[in-house]
Image: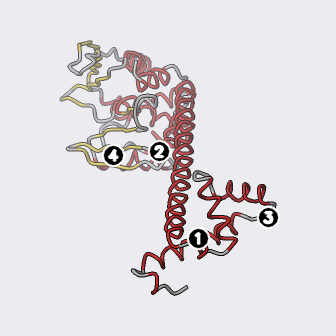
Amino acid sequence: MSFTSKIKSEITKQKFNKIEQISLLSGIIRNEFLEDTIRIQNENEDVARMIFNLVEQIYKIVPKITVRKGYNYNKNYIYIIEINNKEELKKDLSIDKNIPDDYIIDDDNLVRSYIKGVFLAKGSINDPQTSRYHLEILVDNEEYANFINELLNKYSLNSKILKRENKYMIYIKEAEKIGDFLRLIGTTKALLYYEDIRIYRDHINMTNRLNNCEQANVDRIIQTADSQIKDIELIKKYGIELLSEKEQIVAEYRLKYKDASLQELSEIISLETNQKITKPGLHHRFDKIKKLAQKIREKEQPNDWIF
């Protein structure tokens, strides 16, 4: 069972009072008309059963339900629920217009119930374990897409709209906001699973970033040391005495400890010579060595050097 199917099945097990059931059905059935029949398709057996039971309980209508094999890759079963087009049901659910009447979403509980219905009918969330973070609700009307987008953003979910061929996709891509959506619709089991995976992936990503950062630091240390060694070896060709006594000491230790960082080298020199030298002090001496090496490279003849 997909992650989306688990979320939808969890919604169907929640308790709703009669008013909330109406808002829920309104979100599911909106504008699903075929001539004189309301026709709803869903791949989730629990959702199909819930729609059937709610319509029968609230409106005393027995829907017709058909099951057929799907044509998608997984060949899931598709449950088709058909309801004779009753004017009472259409008006009560406010499903014969692009935007439902205010009473459908009159308070926070009704808004949440409506959003649950919309998700049951048109929504999906990628499994965080196998794919990127992505939630989408696909509708066929721009005005309705804007309406759903506004409902979601009342809860600061940062949803956006993208036109996809002849449909409109309301989507959320931020991992934290998708978790907030699962809180909004009250799917605790799905939320715990999602957050466990998200925390694990964040931990792995942070570890990778730290490893990359550490490797980058190592690379910089190696590159810096290699550059300093080249400068020293160039100067040695023309006489190490061109350096001051203090600079000769750090040059000697750099050639001796080729892979050491400046911090490590400062500690080694301080320990072995009993002369305290800090990392900034070491950096200053290497800077003078570098400038001398640059002057040597700029001049073709030693007699032209100016120090």
Of residues 244 and 42, which is closer to you in this image?
Answer: 244
Gap between marks 3 and 2 measured at Cα = 55 Å
User: Pointer 2 and pointer 4: residues touching (CB < 8 Å)?
Assistant: no
Three-letter code, disc 3: Gln
* Alpha carbon separation for disc pair 2 and 1: 59 Å
**Residue identified by numbered label 4:** 144
What residue is drawn where x is 55% and y is 43%?
A: 211
Callout 1 touching callout 4 (CB < 8 Å): no
Instruction: Specify which label sits upstream in the sequence, 1 or 4.
Output: 4
Q: How far apart are marks 3 and 4 (CA)?
A: 77 Å
Whichever of labels 2 and 4 marks the residue nearer the N terminus, that label is 4
Q: How much space separates mark 3 and mark 1, taking CA atoms? A: 21 Å
Point out the frontmost of discs 3 and 1.
1
Q: Is residue 77 above or below residue 282?
A: above
- Of the residues shown, which amino acid type is indicated by label 1? Ile
Q: Which amino acid does label 2 sit on?
A: Glu
- Residue 251's spot in the image, x, y percent? 62, 64
Q: Earlier in the sequence, mark 3 or mark 4?
A: 4
User: Which circle's residue, 3 or 2, is located before the other in the chain?
Assistant: 2
The label on residue 275 is 3
Front in this rendered view, residue 228 or 39: 228
Q: Nearer the viewer, mark 1 or mark 4?
A: 1
Q: How far apart are marks 2 and 4 (CA)?
A: 23 Å
Q: Which mark is residue 174?
A: 2
User: Residue 50 sits in which quadrant?
Assistant: top left
Q: Residues within 10 Å of mark 3 (few under 14, many from 20)?
A: few
Q: Please, is residue 224 above or below residue 61 in the view?
A: below
Residue 132, label in figure: none
User: What residue does disc 1 label?
Assistant: 240
Instruction: Name which residue type carries label 4.
Output: Tyr
